Image (cartoon, coloured by chain):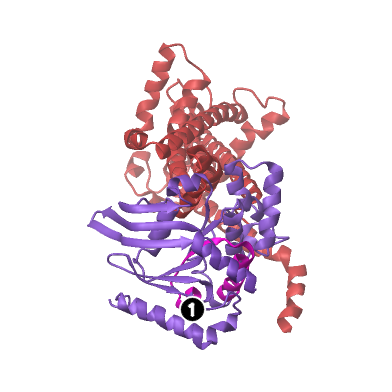
Chain colours: A purple, B red
Amino acid sequence: MAPLDEERINDVAQEPVIVAEKLDLTFQTNDGAVQALRDVNLTINKGDFVSFIGPSGCGKTTFLRVVAALEHPTGGEISVNGMTPDEARRQRAYGYVFQAAGLYPWRTIAKNIKLPLEIMGFSKESQQEHLEKVLKLVDLEGFGEKFPWQLSGGMQQRASIARALAFDADILLMDEPFGALDEIVRDHLNEQLLALWNRTGKTIGFVTHSIPEAVYLSTRIVVMSPRPGRITDVIESTLPQERPLDIRDTPEFLEIAHRVREGLRAGHAYDD
Amino acid sequence: MSDAAIAPAAGGFGAGARAVRDVVLPVFVVVAVIVALWYVACVPMNIKEALTQAERGGAVINPEGARERRDMSAIGLVFKNPSYAADTLNQERPRLPAPHQVGRELWKTTGAMVLTGRGFSKRSLIYHGWVTLSATVLGFVIGTVAGVGLAIGIVHSRVMNMAVMPWAIASQTIPILAIAPMIIVVLNSIGVTGLLPKALISAYLSFFPVAVGMVKGLRSPDNMQLDLLSTYSASKSETFWKLRLPSSMPYFFTSMKIAMAASLVGAIVGELPTGAVRGLGARLLAGSYYGQTVQIWAALFAAAILAAVLVGMIGMLQRVTLKKMGMVH
């Protein structure tokens, strides 16, 4: 594992993928302006696993949506792979995983995963190739011909991750992907996600409400706080690359979790 | 253990019995109650006419004289002359025909005529039903196509949403009985006669439920679904074909069922101002001209059976399609 680690550190030093500078985003609502993001500065490097944690309304999802060009900032700069988010989207720079699997009930798992490929104009053979590759990646071989309702919630979410990976984007943006699943399934998926990340070297932005989940998965944890949405702390993880589930009982893990909690408290995340 | 032992036995013997208990029995009970109520209602409805005829035939009625009885309560008369209750069910021109009279008339004008080889004569309900059916189906098709087209425009264009929807709603607040003769007359004056004017009245009634249902259906995908497609840079037409249209299918079939029923009403109404020549609407009108209540009721039942068959066919199409799409299981 050691050489892989070095390689990753080298990458980190050299290749910024997502760069946000002085990012501001204000929504105009009927009750007046709401500042969803204020002065957000953040650099995410290639191969990073960055978690965004904070209470509701802290702008963590909004930031991810800005990266995906689903929202547009009202101030500051953001670049993805050196391009604007809109250009990056057209270059298929990222796959996006939502909180709900959102599979089409009228399509089989295979046809669901092929959906982005159809839209992006992949050939039939190439669609099949990509499908088989990502089904293996999320451990769903043999389930391609099933309809979504025939799968458990956890398997559906894995299928939606496969859909996001299908077109070989280097960046994976995940908005509370396991938030609706129970804890046991969630543990399992966290483990599988880490393995997938280790194998593929994707850059992952991961929004979560859960401190253990953030600490367990990330190389870096971005702590955010609401009203206005802003970054209050960025914590580099000292955990090793290889992380079995019981690493969550080590003092090192608890130490990082404690820092995250302190960061949330400093940002008044626990106030009413 | 005991549950497991009982289950297969119940499955083997009980399946048929359970179908009888859960489906056949409730349906039978409801129909029986309706028929019974109908018979009971026939007695006071027809008692005055029955008594008048009996009196003409020489019977002694209490009180004597049709004029005497004119303003009396019908139920009171039944209790004063209970022996004539049976006569009320077999009047030649009853106010309310009894179920068996309607059934006999239905058979006489359908099955019996088919047996004698006159199934398509002008006295046959099959002939009139066919005339109404063709206008209904044509109008339904026009209305459905127009409704879907309108819905697509409304969903994709803010201008159409604001400009068309109020008119569509306003169109349905006008009584169809008022506008149907105008459509017939106007189209007739420009030389359009026959099936099309009636079909257009049907379409006028049936486009609305389809338009409203499809607007709802095409808008049913949530923001997350739409966001997902924008992360693929999908175009509006891709979003339509791959997401909006399949999502709208359950809404589509439900609104088609309503549209079909409305279309039949439209066709029947469209047949009234044409001078009562052909179709179930013409039968209804002719029946009321000549006081043929049995004929009216037979035509009404023919229309109801027609509607049930048409709506049932859409329901079957719905089950098959949605099952094939994996949306019901």
Residue B40 vertical placement versus A235 (above, below): above
Res. B168 in view:
no
Of all residues, the one furthest to the left in this rendering is A32
Magenta extent: A186-214
| Residue labelled with disc 1 | A212
* Quarter residue B24 falls in: bottom right
Q: Residue A228: horizontal and vertical position, in percent? A: 28, 65
Q: Position of residue A177 (x, y in %)?
A: 51, 65
Along the horizontal axis of the image, is B155 left or right of A253? Answer: left
The answer to whether one can see residue A56 in this image is: yes
Q: A113 left or right of B185?
A: right
Horizontal side, residue B137 vs residue A126: left or right: left
B105 up-or-down from A261: above or below = above
Query: Magenta span has B139?
Result: no
- In which quarter of the view is residue B55 placed? top left
Label 1 Cα crowd, 10 Å radius (few <14 / some 14-19 / many 20+): some
Q: Label 1: chain?
A: A
Q: Is residue A24 left or right of residue B290?
A: left
Specify whether residue A188 is painted magenta. yes
Based on the displayed image, in which of its 4 quarters is residue B161 positioned? top left
Q: Position of residue B113 (x, y in %)?
A: 67, 29
